[in-house]
Image (spheres, rainbow, N blue to C red):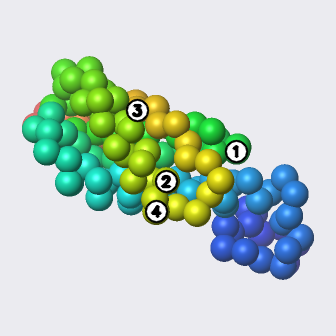
Amino acid sequence: MAGRGRRSSGGGSGSGRGGGHRYPRSARVGETLREIIADELVRIDDERLSFVTVTGIEVDNELNRAHVYFDSLAGEEGDDEIIEALTAHRSRLQSSIAKQIRTKKTPILDFRPDIALRSAERIDDILREDRQRRGQA
């Protein structure tokens, strides 16, 4: 079929070489980084990171920088403290990454709260409250 939509990230006929292969590689590296960082966070003895979840990672094309998105039970109020803790453990995380992945460089980690996830949760809460309100009316 001619118009199937996007190509899958799982290989293909090779015609996707060039501009199209950037996404699958960075996505694979991002997923690998997410797993490594999540495993390492379990090992780090820092109570500020007890309930932190790595929700996603965006890696730039050159693997120079990786934006690590997180969420926690502390919500927005805990973001500054979590960023401080993650930054304090950055060298340990990057060292663990360097030992476990096979790339020429290890991306510099940049930590950010997952605003998109929180926005989706807020929208869900608003919709749930609206349904409850309409059901009671």
Rendered position, 70 above or below 43: above
Distance from disc 3 to disc 2, alpha carbons, whole Å, reads 18 Å
Give whichever of discs 2 and 1 has the lower sequence position: 1
Q: Which residue is mark 1?
A: 61
Q: Amino acid at mark 2?
A: Ala
Residue sitting at 38 percent across and 57 percent down? 36
Q: Which mark is residue 94?
A: none
Mark 4 vs mark 3: which is more N-terminal?
4
| Mark 3–mark 2 CB contact (< 8 Å) | no
Q: Are marks 1 and 4 in contact (CB under 8 Å)?
A: no
Distance between mark 4 and mark 3 Cα atoms: 20 Å
Q: Residue at x 66, y 73 (%)?
A: 10
Tell me the SS state at disc 1. loop
Q: CA distance from mark 2 to mark 4?
A: 6 Å
Q: Amino acid at mark 1?
A: Asn
- Amino acid beneath label 3: Phe
Q: Which residue is mark 3?
A: 111
- At label 4, which amino acid type do we have? Gln
**Nearer to us: label 4 or label 3:** 4
2 and 4 marks in contact (CB < 8 Å): yes
Residue 135 visible from this viewpoint: no
State the residue position of label 2. Answer: 98
Callout 4 crowding tier (Cα within 10 Å): few <14, some 14–19, many ≥20: few
Inter-mark Cα distance, 1 to 4: 20 Å
- x then y, percent, for residue 50: 14, 43
The answer to whether residue 17 is visible is yes
Find disc 4 in the rendering and name its residue. 100
